[in-house]
Structure formats: structure tokens, C-alpha cells
């Protein structure tokens, strides 16, 4: 008989505790004495192998429920999301661990994509994100914090490249949810927050120097934080009732899409034109019956109209006096326009032919501009 087999089971379990969990489990084939020793280990770690390898998922399902100790001191799941491991697997493993009276549960997720919908975070979103060290794509939809916590979401992920954050869209919302975004490597941002104002928390959005595309649907009036953080953007879609202060220049912006359904004043529209000196494509959409009710021409022609704007599109064109004035202003001041495409609104009460004549016979700064009317 070998000497190690003469040791007590408690001492053998102590020895096994120094081994990785998978190796400790493998000792069960040595003899009947060793067959169940690993099931008494106080600490377990299941580590997903790098690369898609079959067997790891089945290994956890087979061995985790067999644990015999009164409780598990610590369970650490190190998981690489791939085609074999699904979110429902993790949910079930957590349920098993709770049934085994786990005292400390650590989950480290190596995944580049995470989607959260209608989740209430008991310990905060930041704690979950801290165990996702390689996360690149994050979507957070209608999430909130627990009743015993401040209603504040913190997203601090240096590796993140794409973020979609929807606080509310008018139909689904959590009132007065504050948020902080610190994602220095972000390339794409979608932010939907139609809250008219934040009573307790002002959103804090830090600079995103690598951002190239953004979709912003904002209900509150002060846009300084969001505009100041996205000055590097190349493609921007924005729908907002708010305005922002002077001092911001969107020097990289090439394509701007404005949804005017919330813009009851023209200040934001004019300001974005003025602060986008290299704009090449301007899209206007979504005016409807409640769109811009006034149009105040800028005191000086924005630089983009004189030097860079080449394409101007307007969908859902209503043909009201203020709409016509904006379209004519672009036509008469954009020196390098190549294409203007106007798509009339189905709700317009003005005959399509009349709208066409009004624009077709207006003067144009660009002699090569082609006007298309749908």
C-alpha cells in the first residue's frame, strides 16, 4: 500500500485543494478511496479552455452537482463565451451553486459581446462589467438598480468599442436614472434617453476620442456633456429638444442626420451646421406635424455650405413655409452640392406638384446640383 493512501481523508482533501479543480477530479480514478475525495473540496474553479473545445460544458454539468461538502467556500467560474456555452448555462450553474450553499461566487467572463435587457442590478452594473475584461460590444436596454441602491448606472470599460444604452424611449422607462459613461476606445454609440430632465443625477459622459458613429435620442435640454464627448464623430444621427454651448467643433463630422420631430426651435439645427465645417452629407427626417415651428437663418453662412456639403436629403418633407425656407436656404448657399433628394410626406396637405415647383425654380449656388423629388 502506498504511503499517501495511509493519510486521513481530511489531509488528502487538503492536498487536493492545491490542485486545479479538473486535476483534482481526475484523481477519482486512482482507487475507491480517491473516488469521492474531490467532492469535499472547499474551493472550486472551473476554467473554460481557450478555443472551442467540446467537453467543458458537460464537465461542469456532470461534476458541480456532485459536491458533498456542507457548503462551498468559493466557486470561481472562468468562462469563455463561444458556441458551446450559453447564458442559460451560466444561469443554471448559479442556481446549482446556490443550492449547494456557496458562500462566495466569482464569475469571470471572457466575451466580447454582452446584451442586458430589463435587468435590475442588486450590486450595480459596474460590478458585473468588472469581470468582463475583454468586452467590446455592450447593449443595455431598460436596466435599473435595486431598491436599496442609488439609481445610477456606471459603465467604465476601457476595451469597449460599441455601446447601446437605452434608459427610456417614452414607452418603457425608469424615472430619473443617472449614468456615467467612461469608454475611451468606443467607436460606436447609441444613446436613447428621452427623459425631459434628470432631477437627481446629471449624466456624465467622458471624452470618446476614437468615436466614429453615434445615434443620439435625447430629451433633456442641456447637451453639453454629450456633444463635448463626441467631437471626433464622423457620422451622427441626433434627435433632441436640447441645445449646447459654444466652443465645440465637430471637425471630423462628414454625415449628419437630423430628426426634427423634437426640434421646435431652429437653434440646434443652425448650431450643428455652424460647428461641422467639413460636413458632406446632410439628412433631414421625421418632421411630421409637430416639427420645427420656426426657422431663423444664421447670421453668416456656415462654412460647410460654402466648402464641403455635397448631398442634401429630406425625407418626410411637409412643404410648409418653414420647411421650404430651410430647403431654399441650403440650395442657394451650398456651393458644392451635387444631389438634393426630397421625399414628400404622405400627411402633407400641400400638392406635390406645387412643392416641386417651389424648389425647382429657386436659385442654386451649385450649377451641377441635381434635384430629385419623390
Image (spheres, rainbow, N blue to C red):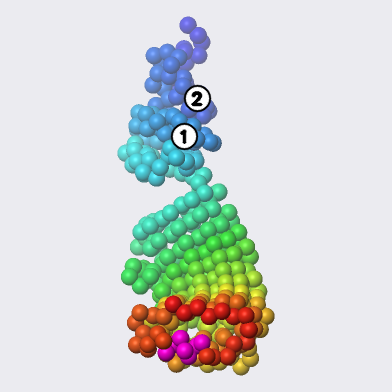
In this view, the residue in front, 161 or 59, is 161
The secondary structure that dominates the magenta segment is: helix
Image spot of residue 220 (x, y percent): 45, 78
Residue at left offset 56%, top offset 89%: 329
Q: Look at the picture and state if 197 lies above or below 107.
A: below
Residue 23 numbered tag: 2
The boundaries of the magenta stretch are 354-360
Name the spot of residue 134 as percent of width and height, x first: 55, 49
Instruction: Decide if residue 108 is in sight here.
Output: no
**Do the numbered discs 2 and 1 sit on residues whose CB atoms are within 8 Å?**
no
Look at the image and tell me in which quarter the C terminus lies. bottom left
Q: Position of residue 63 (x, y in %)?
A: 39, 29
The residue that mark 1 highlights is 46
Q: Does residue 327 lie above or below 281 as drawn?
A: below
| Residue under the point 55% across and 81% down | 244
Q: To which quarter of the image does residue 84 belong?
A: top left
Q: Earlier in the sequence, mark 2 or mark 1?
A: 2
- Quarter-of-image position of residue 149: bottom left
Q: Is residue 99 left or right of residue 338?
A: left
How dense is the environment of label 2, judged by Cα within 10 Å: few (below 14), some, or many (20 and up)? few
Does the stretch in magenta take in 251?
Answer: no
Q: Is residue 357 magenta?
A: yes
Relative height, residue 320 to residue 185 (above, below): below
Amino acid at each position: 500500500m502506498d504511503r499517501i493512501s495511509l493519510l486521513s481523508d481530511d489531509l488528502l482533501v487538503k492536498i487536493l485543494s492545491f490542485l486545479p479543480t479538473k486535476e483534482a477530479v481526475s484523481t477519482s480514478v486512482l482507487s475507491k478511496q480517491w473516488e469521492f475525495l474531490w467532492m469535499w473540496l472547499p474551493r472550486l474553479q472551473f476554467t473554460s479552455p481557450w478555443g472551442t473545445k467540446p467537453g467543458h460544458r458537460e464537465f461542469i454539468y456532470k461534476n458541480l452537482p456532485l459536491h458533498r461538502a456542507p457548503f462551498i467556500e468559493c466557486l470561481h467560474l472562468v468562462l469563455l463565451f463561444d458556441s458551446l456555452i450559453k447564458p442559460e448555462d451560466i444561469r443554471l450553474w448559479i442556481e446549482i451553486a446556490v443550492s449547494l450553499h456557496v458562500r462566495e461566487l466569482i464569475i469571470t467572463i471572457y466575451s466580447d459581446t454582452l446584451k442586458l435587457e430589463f435587468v435590475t442590478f442588486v450590486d450595480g452594473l459596474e460590478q458585473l462589467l468588472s469581470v468582463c475584461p475583454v468586452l467590446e460590444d455592450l447593449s443595455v436596454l431598460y436596466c435599473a438598480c435595486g431598491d436599496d441602491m442609488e439609481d445610477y448606472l456606471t459603465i467604465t470599460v476601457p476595451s469597449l468599442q460599441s455601446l447601446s444604452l437605452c434608459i427610456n424611449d417614452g414607452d418603457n422607462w425608469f424615472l430619473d436614472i443617472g449614468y456615467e459613461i467612461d469608454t475611451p476606445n468606443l467607436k460606436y454609440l447609441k444613446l436613447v434617453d428621452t427623459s425631459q430632465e434628470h432631477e437627481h443625477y446629471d449624466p456624465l459622459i467622458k471624452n470618446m476620442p476614437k468615436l466614429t458613429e453615434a445615434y443620439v435620442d435625447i430629451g433633456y435640454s442641456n447637451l453639453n456633456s454629450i456633444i463635448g464627448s463626441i467631437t471626433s464623430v464622423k457620422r451622427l444621427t441626433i434627435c433632441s429638444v436640447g441645445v449646447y454651448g459654444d466652443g465645440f467643433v465637430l471637425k471630423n463630422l462628414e454625415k449628419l442626420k437630423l430628426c426634427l420631430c423634437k426640434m421646435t426651435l431652429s437653434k440646434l439645427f443652425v448650431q450643428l451646421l455652424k460647428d461641422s465645417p467639413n460636413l458632406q452629407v446632410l439628412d433631414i427626417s421625421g418632421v411630421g406635424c409637430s416639427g420645427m415651428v420656426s426657422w431663423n437663418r444664421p447670421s453668416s453662412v456656415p462654412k460647410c455650405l460654402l466648402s464641403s456639403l455635397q448631398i442634401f436629403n429630406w425625407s418626410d418633407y411637409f412643404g410648409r413655409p418653414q420647411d421650404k425656407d430651410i430647403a431654399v436656404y441650403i440650395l442657394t448657399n451650398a456651393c458644392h452640392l451635387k444631389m438634393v433628394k426630397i421625399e414628400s410626406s404622405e400627411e402633407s396637405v400641400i400638392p406635390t406638384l406645387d412643392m416641386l415647383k417651389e424648389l425647382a425654380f429657386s436659385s442654386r449656388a451649385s450649377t451641377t446640383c441635381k434635384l430629385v423629388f419623390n
